[in-house]
Amino acid sequence: MPRIRKKHVADWCDESDLPIYLLDHERKIRYCNPACCCWLQVEQDELIGMQCDYHSELVEPDHDRPPLAIGLCPPPVVFTGERATGLVYANGVPEGQSAEFIPLGLEESAVLVIVGLASTTPAEDTPFREFDSQRLHELLFERRQQQATLYQLDQLVGESSQMRRVREQVSLAVRGDCPVVTVGMSGTGRAHLIRTIHTARYSKSDVPLIEIDCPLFDADTLASVINDLRRAVEGSVTKTALLMLEIDQLPQDAQATLYQLLQEHPEPSLVYATSSADLIMLAKSENAAFRSDLADDLCTSVISLPPLSERLDDLPLLIQLAIERQNASGEKQVQGAAPQVIERLLRHPWTRNLDELFECMSEAHQQAVGRFVTERDLPDWIKLTLEAERHPHRPETTIDLENYLQEVERELMRRALKVAKGNKAMAARLLGISRGRLLRRLASLQLEDA
């Protein structure tokens, strides 16, 4: 068979109507045909040399623009010589295109990608609890692309009913201009959600967000800070927004001061808050832990974030997100977590919620030596927690000594009477007590008929 010259292969690729590109072992694009440039709407010289990482981050680390080559990276296993199919994405387009990933078997593990050649099942047709890392990657990419027009929020990833409701609430909050309170446990991303809503609202204007840690502020300090902010914006068209962190822990006198200042001075006119409890319910509690008038003013829009333990159906996708976040910030590329890892993490209590999950997967990503995170890569503190669950602590039990001794006494008397065939005098001798004492104890223990 005559040898095909490299020139002829390149000519065939250039003439193909299918988008084709070539990645080297460093995941850098070394070739793309005209059809690929047309599909991505870029010039060839813009794309050549770009590095493709396996992630779904919508902006590059330390940059505010989308990566040019986002969505083009094959699964990392392809670079080890395993042929695969999957979806690739043009930047800004949530729908993926089927592609064939062909390792060329060269010394440097180059990969040829032909778009439109393969036939793949869309990610949305895959059961959400399916632990296939490539399908999770595709679903994650499409969901984040769909949300990119309004917000980019890691904690909103998921298909659970709770997260669908939260996404609807966030969409409304982004389009509004009223106070927003996020309620939930620590680690659920309450403050991050507020920051992102604020950024989405005022992306084209300079509206600073000043954060106040409420448990640390008394009435005088809070008044001083807010008055300073008010004076700073006097005579200016610029608004200032406050983010009251843990407002449910704001002292009572400071609550009164905050309400008074907000009534007297409209600036800063916008107040956000995070809370671990519903402010309206706190105001209605017996001890009225929160001012009802302040709660009414703040709770125009309330978004409740569920703990991770109540949205475990989202865990596989969140694990994939955490892994791809690490892929975006470093050279190591991990395709996903082994199914055994996900099964094991589903049993973890996640007391620190998303913060704990991302910390866990960051450490696991660092420890991973292959293309997947395995059980041996999990942090020791995760393993210890799971091991402790297999051997739960037995609750302490107390012994009622008096009842215990009475039961022992009853049993001894029953045995003595049985041996004596009901003769109480003989039974008393067997027990080493007088007949009169035996009769008194039988009556006390309700054994007269024994």
Image (cartoon, rainbow, N blue to C red):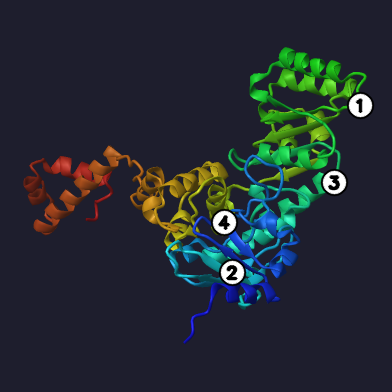
In the foreground, 88 or 365: 88
Q: CA distance from mark 3 to mark 1?
A: 20 Å
Q: Earlier in the sequence, mark 3 or mark 1?
A: 3
Which residue does the image show at 61% across and 54% down from the upper left? 49
- 246 left or right of 232? left
| Residue depth check, mark 1 versus mark 2: number of the one nearer the observer | 2
Q: Do the CB atoms of the residues marked 3 and 1 lie less than 8 Å apart?
A: no
Q: Residue at x 73, y 35 (%)?
A: 279
Mark nearer the viewer, 4 or 1: 4
Closer to the chain start, of discs 4 and 3, is: 4
The residue indicated by pointer 4 is: 28
Asked whether the residues under the numbered discs 4 and 3 touch, taking CB atoms below 8 Å apart as contact, a structural biologist would say no
Q: Position of residue 240 (x, y in %)?
A: 82, 27
261 w.r.t. 418: above or below: above
Mark 3 vs 2, N-terminal side: 2
Q: Which mark is residue 48?
A: none
Q: Position of residue 425 (x, y in %)?
A: 9, 49
Q: Which residue is mark 1?
A: 237
